Image (cartoon, rainbow, N blue to C red):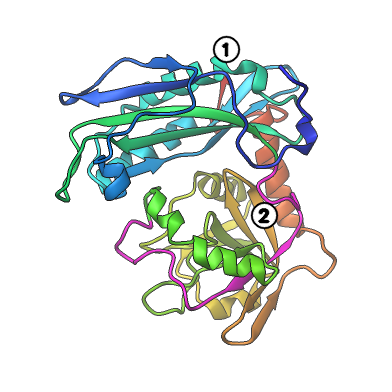
Amino acid sequence: MEHIDWSNLSFGYMKTDYNVRCYYRDGKWGELEVSSSDTINIHMGATCLHYGQESFEGLKVFKGQDGKARVFRMDENAKRMQASSRGIRMPELPVEQFEEAVRKVVKLNERFIPPYESGAALYVRPIMLGLGAQVGVSPAKEYLFMIFVTPVGPYFKEGFKPTAMAILRGYDRAAPLGTGTIKVGGNYAASLAAGEKAHELGYSAVLYLDAKEKKYIDECGPANFFGIRGNSYITPLSSSILPSITNKSLMTLAESMGMTVERRQVAEDELATFQEAGACGTAAVISPIQRIDDLDENKSYVFSTDGKPGPISEKLYNKLRAIQYGDEADEFNWVKILD
């Protein structure tokens, strides 16, 4: 294996040794198969290509100081993938089979798990595709579940440093009763135009408002939003937000630190009352927000003037990372050691 500069990895794809696959045919899931090919054969009439019948997940594996590989809350990813399957009429993969696939693919690619304190992790990408050929709009009869892995660095090149985000009212992330609550590719395709525009204007991401009234905070494209006011951790509740496993974990940590957790509608005007704000998700854990500019209303909400994350965001970030790496006791039973 060529030498990998672990501390300078981007959040991109690097070929690893193996992936695992499992087919759904004749009404049942088959056995796990191992492949060293990074391509798949798809019928040109497959529902994933024509009607977006596909879902995916993202989770990370960390190497601890003891040299052991740890995966964070993979049962939650398995359950969320089942929710995506229900949402777009794909078969649900049992949680045990999902976890077995994660263990197997990580073991097969052990040499790609970045070392402790390199700032990198092994990113695990499960995906489910409708393979059956359909010309009419209806669910396929055949599906592929597969997982590949790749070592990655920080999602935002700035790392754990505050960045500026923009509110762009001319774009919606997802409809209120659409697919926003499930992890399907179409949601991300819908965010590309707004994301590109934000990047061109010098922002790291878009903070979306609700599609119905353009009044309430929704989420930050690929991540959930939270704000800190006094001793409260406040995060939006909406019928179009993906339930982030990282956000769920941060809410639990905030409560364990004696904070009040509020999960409710958050009006844009309330941003002015927050001392700290952040985006949270598997890829970045927490991305602190320096400021949010509402470009249409010519308003700006500032959360960091010294270029540093707020104290509560930092405390939450360090606590979650310490649990993920095995540096602190896992009192919530979130981490599984992959042996």
Quadrant in the picture for residue 95: top left
The type of residue carrying mark 2 is: Ser
> Within the magenta stretch, is there residue 250?
no
Q: Which residues are magenta?
A: 154-180
Residue 77 visible in rendering: yes
- Please tell me which residue is depicted at 44% across the width and 79% down the height of the picture: 214
Identity of the residue furthest to the bottom in this view: 297
Question: Total label count?
Answer: 2
Whichever of callouts 2 and 1 sits on the residue coming sooner in the sequence is 2
Q: Residues within 10 Å of mark 2 (few under 14, many from 20)?
A: many
* Rendering coords of residue 250 (x, y %): 58, 48
Q: Is residue 18 left or right of residue 211?
A: right
Read off the residue under disc 2: 287
Which mark, by number, is residue 339?
1
Identity of the residue furthest to the top in this view: 339
> Within the magenta stretch, is there residue 160?
yes
